Amino acid sequence: MLADFNPSTTTLKPMSIGGIVVDPPLTLAPMAGHTNHAFRVICREMGDCGLVCTELISGHIVQERSARSFKMFDWSDVEHPFAVQLFGSDPAMMAEAARMVADAGADIIDINMGCWVPKLVKKGAGAALLRDVCTATLVVGAVVRAVNIPVTVKVRSGWDAQQITAVEFAHAAEDVGVQAVSVHGRTAAQGFSGTADWNIIRQVKEAVKHIPVIGNGDVFCAADAAKMLAMTGCDAVMIGRAALGNPWIFRQTAHELNMGETLPAPTLTERAAVALRHARLTIESTYLNERQAVYELRGQISKYHLDAPGTVAVRNRLVQAETLADIEFILTPLLEE
Ligand SMILES: Cc1cc2nc3c(=O)[nH]c(=O)nc-3n(C[C@H](O)[C@H](O)[C@H](O)COP(=O)(O)O)c2cc1C
């Protein structure tokens, strides 16, 4: 998309979220099933990912002190700065969950107001809050008052084309003390269809007074990031799907925007080495048993493009892997290519 935009005319300036410096202003989007400890560390290690975020975690089960939620407290010091994303619609429950997450070392609490899966929406959480700006503001205000660390929110443009509420909500959220807003330029009704509307990101940026705005949606390369920054005036760019299997995208983008030149793409050997590290780190750090973790890894590792163009041999073998040893057996020969 927009690959003809000239990235060399854009410079990246560090962003501050309530005193937490995000430098460069390129952030990893929260993605359930992907942005666990292993992947967040890999994105940091590959360079120039200014902020990482956990997958969404239920405020309800955190507040209940359920063993399940504590298993998702998988972060460690090497990830700083990082945000922990919570979802829920009950202000008191979210406040309590936020306190527990802050006590467990998070730098930032991010509140999910974009997820449209029916399980969440039925309970009034995630994107459902975009239909109810009043409750959304109560939730955010309660969380802000509960913790001493910055609180951010991640929204979609609105619930549907008739209810575009991101601007109204961003105003209200800033007034109750939110320190940054991330905006994915699609409505909840859109899911992932169509293209992201970056105008809404610009409108939110123009509407808020002092807090940074993070633009999100359909950034697949450095030129897209440059174009989003220029078109919307946003303070940072959040990258999701394009980072899957390509944790180099942050370094590639920062280099292209800051230095005006394109970095060479990682070689097959480099991709295989990072994919292998991703698999090993996952098994070391996951709360899942090895078999469950390898099932998740099959899809994640397949995204590293480990096959020569037009072939699928490695991918076909990866989808049959049952253990870490199977993945190691498939990937190790690629390290010698
Ligand atoms: C597999 C997957 C899981 C996601 N999980 C979350 C999530 O847990 N919390 C959230 O706020 N957004 C979630 N999202 C949305 C992304 O954070 C992001 O807003 C969206 O993918 C658009 O950005 P992109 O075009 O750079 O991918 C998810 C997206 C994907 C593809």
Image (cartoon, rainbow, N blue to C red):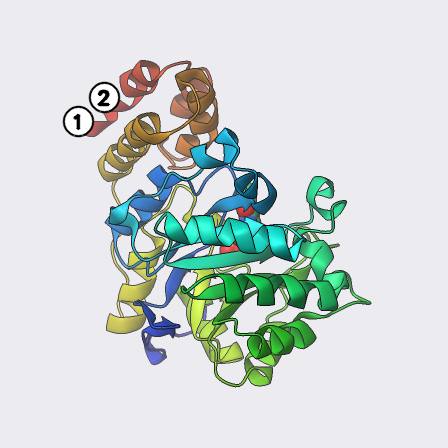
Query: For residue 255, which quarter of the picture?
Result: bottom left
Residue at left offset 68%, top offset 55%: 127
Image location (x, y in percent) of residue 301: 39, 31
> In front here: 295 or 166?
166
Q: What amino acid is at disc 2?
A: Pro
Element on which disc 1 rests: helix
Image location (x, y in percent) of residue 337: 20, 29
Tell me, for residue 62, which label it has, or none: none
Q: Residues within 10 Å of mark 1 (few under 14, many from 20)?
A: few
Compared with residue 266, is residue 273 higher up or lower down, i.e. above or below?
Answer: above
Tell me, for residue 333, which label it has, or none: 2
Residue at left offset 50%, top offset 53%: 98
Q: Is residue 292 visible?
A: yes
Compared with residue 188, is residue 301 higher up or lower down, i.e. above or below?
Answer: above
Compared with residue 204, is residue 243 higher up or lower down, i.e. above or below?
Answer: above
> In front here: 326 or 178?
178
Element on which disc 2 rests: helix
Image location (x, y in percent) of residue 215: 51, 68
| Residue pointed to by mark 1 | 336
Q: What amino acid is at disc 1?
A: Glu
Seen from this angle, which residue lies furthest right? 162
Answer yes or no: do the residues labelled 1 and 2 have beta carbons within 8 Å? yes
